[in-house]
Amino acid sequence: MNLRNPSKATAALLATIFLSAFSPGSHASNDGKLCEGPAGIVFCGSLMAIQALTPKTAAERLNDAARNGELENLKNLLKFFPDTVQPLHLLSTAMYSYIYRENSQAKDADKLKTIQFLLNRGVDVTDGGTNKFVVSLASGVLNTRRLEMTELVLAYGASAKDVELSVLVLTAGRHGYAESDDLYYRMLKLLLEHDADPNRTERGRKPALLTLVTLNQFPMAELLLQHGADPDAGKNPTEPSGLLFLAASCGKPDYKWTSKEVADRNWNKCLSDLPAKVSFLVGHGADVNGKAGMPSQCATPYDIAKKEDNALLLKTLLELKADPRFGEKCLASG
């Protein structure tokens, strides 16, 4: 290093080191000690200078443009660096940014245009692994209430066959879905129209239909049934009918976590809501006797309601033509 006739880069490095010695920030680092003392100041100042003098790589600039929705910048960069970053990687970067960064309405529009441009560059969203990644990521827009990206990706040929609808409806329940808010209904309809399986469930979750009925979300439940949801699907593969789960779902008032007044109010509401839930499923083809058989030890919804002393549900089941002796007959024949 020639200190008498320094190059521009050397001069910048020396200036940064000098300024860092008098900068309060020069004494801050990840461990609080790295930049302490004369040697530390020189070390950290050198790093700052190197960072200032080192331009971003082409890949970093491409990803930044995709992440920030800077479409014209991205187009220009791709003219010079067309193969530097894989198309799927750029697309995923843009999609993640759209979902998880807070954006203005104008920025949302810019990012959607960027995503559409990247889709037009030939990412095969119909390919198995790519399709699963793209659609599952697109479904995440529910958390930020932006459906347009899912619509866009599906319009380019992606299939929703790998989307687990039981997760979607849990999100709807967690966010307090109401009939006046059609975001979740529109999303569910969109996915079902693009090959989502209404009966698919994983990791021990209840089927989407049973979850929706439990949450009193009958319009969305109706939509699932229109696309082939099984009205008899139990809460897990070993339970023959969701009616068995519903019949036992109210249990007894739980005074452990809340006051007696609140617990009793919640319990009474559960009991009063239950007949409508059971009637809905039976009205759409569910076996009123709960498909009783050996997997359930011949128990029927009527038997469970009787055990729970749920007079209102017993009355409803009889009105729906349940056989009060079905369980007894099943045991006798077994």
Image (cartoon, rainbow, N blue to C red):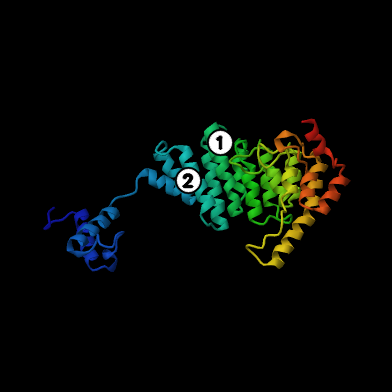
- For residue 108, above or below residue 240: below
Q: Residue at x 29, y 53 (%)?
A: 51
Residue 297, by quadrant, is top right
Tell me the crowding category of disc 2: few under 14, some 14 to 19, or many 20 or more residues within 10 angstroms, Cα based: some
Tell me the crowding category of disc 1: few under 14, some 14 to 19, or many 20 or more residues within 10 angstroms, Cα based: many
Which mark lies nearer to you, 2 or 1?
A: 1
Name the residue type under label 2.
Thr
**Left or right: 37 as drawn, with respect to 202:** left
Mark 2–mark 1 Cα distance, whole angstroms, equals: 16 Å
* Residue picked out by circle 1: 131
Q: Position of residue 140 (x, y in %)?
A: 57, 48
**Front-most of residues 315 and 121:** 315
Name the residue type under label 1.
Asn
Q: Residue at x 70, y 63 (%)?
A: 263
Q: Position of residue 207 (x, y in %)?
A: 67, 42
* Residue picked out by circle 2: 93
Question: Do the residues under discs 2 and 1 have CB atoms within 8 angstroms?
Answer: no
**Left or right: 59 as drawn, with respect to 48:** right
Classify mark 2: helix, strand or loop: helix
Q: Position of residue 259 (x, y in %)?
A: 67, 67
**Front-most of residues 287 and 113:** 287
Q: Position of residue 173 (x, y in %)?
A: 66, 53
Q: Where is the C terminus found, in terms of image quarters?
A: top right
Classify mark 1: helix, strand or loop: helix
- For residue 83, above or below residue 94: above
Spot the residue most to the front.
332
**Left or right: 11 as drawn, with respect to 56:** left
- For residue 56, above or below residue 88: below
